[in-house]
Amino acid sequence: MRIQAFLPVVLMLLLSFTVRAESDVSGSSDPHQLPRFPLSWIVSYNTRTVPEYALATGPMRKIGGIIAPELDKRIKGELTRITYRLPDIDTPDQAFNYYLKLLQSMQAKILFQCSSRQCGSSNQWANNYFEVAELYGLDRSQFFLSASAGNLQLALYTVKRGNRRVYVHIDLIEPLKQTSETLAADLQQQGFSWLNDSEQLEPLIDFMSNNPQQSILIGSYNKASGVALDELLSRSSNAAVEVQDLLIEAGIEPARVSNVGVGPALPVSEIEQPAGVWIQLR
């Protein structure tokens, strides 16, 4: 009887050892913002630059004969795509709630979330959206969310397959590191470019030096909540002037640089940052 009583304990210890012995695929790593679910391991990992990523903000639906997210948010950046496998004793909802709490602790904005058949077809999420066949599981076992945390955008998907294997998948999209080439491409294609970091002006200085006849306008907005309009206008003007002064100090002719602060008067609803600076051709 004692041997029988100890068998479940021994089996659990063996399972724990087996899980801990699993190793991540070569070259992979956790995103520093999101520690992994306990005892999970990375089975697929890749990174690439994406000119346009459709961050799903709605469930899978058949639209015009094509099954795709009903709503999405188009962004560009550096995509990190990570798939974890979980110990078989864990469930998709446990993993989903684990990451949801992490995102809430980061004060992330949840753009959309769904579960079970509300999300649509697992086959579409796995093979068409994430392009990871291992994520094709039971529709009733799936969970999805998309979120925004500062300048980080992400999609999270958890599911159990018919063979009882449980997976967590994360797509992380971070802003492209700005260079003089990416800045020039933005300015040529759309006439303006957001300045990712107002203190890292080397790409802009290089662009101005390589285009000595070009003049620019530095624009700044500020839509912080609970702040009077006059103060918002003042803050945005000061931010634009600060960038202008840094360019002049770097040797750019003052006549080539103008500035404007527009406060909250920016009719672009999808911008989530409370303040920002852009460069515009003149």
Image (cartoon, grey):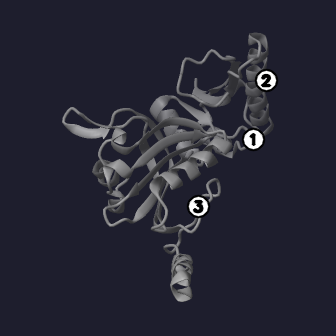
For this orientation, the residue located farthest to the bottom is 3
Mark 3 against mark 1, which lies toward the viewer?
3
Question: Considering only vertical position in the picture, is 171 above or below 20?
Answer: above
- Is label 3 in a helix, a strand or a loop? loop
Q: What is the crowding at mark 1: few (fewer than 14 residues within 10 Å), some, or many (at least 20)?
A: few
- Is label 1 in a helix, a strand or a loop? loop
* Among the two numbered marks 3 and 1 on one chain, the one whose residue lies closer to the N terminus: 3
Q: What is the crowding at mark 3: few (fewer than 14 residues within 10 Å), some, or many (at least 20)?
A: some
As drawn, is 211 to the left or to the right of 76? right
The front one of 57 and 275 is: 57
Mark 2 against mark 3, which lies toward the viewer?
3
> Which residue is at 74% across, 29% downward?
244
Question: Considering only vertical position in the picture, is 175 above or below 4?
Answer: above
Q: Which residue is mark 1?
A: 199
Q: Which residue is mark 2?
A: 238
Q: Which residue is mark 3?
A: 36
Question: Image quarter for residue 229?
Answer: top right
For marks 2 and 3, give the CA distance. 41 Å
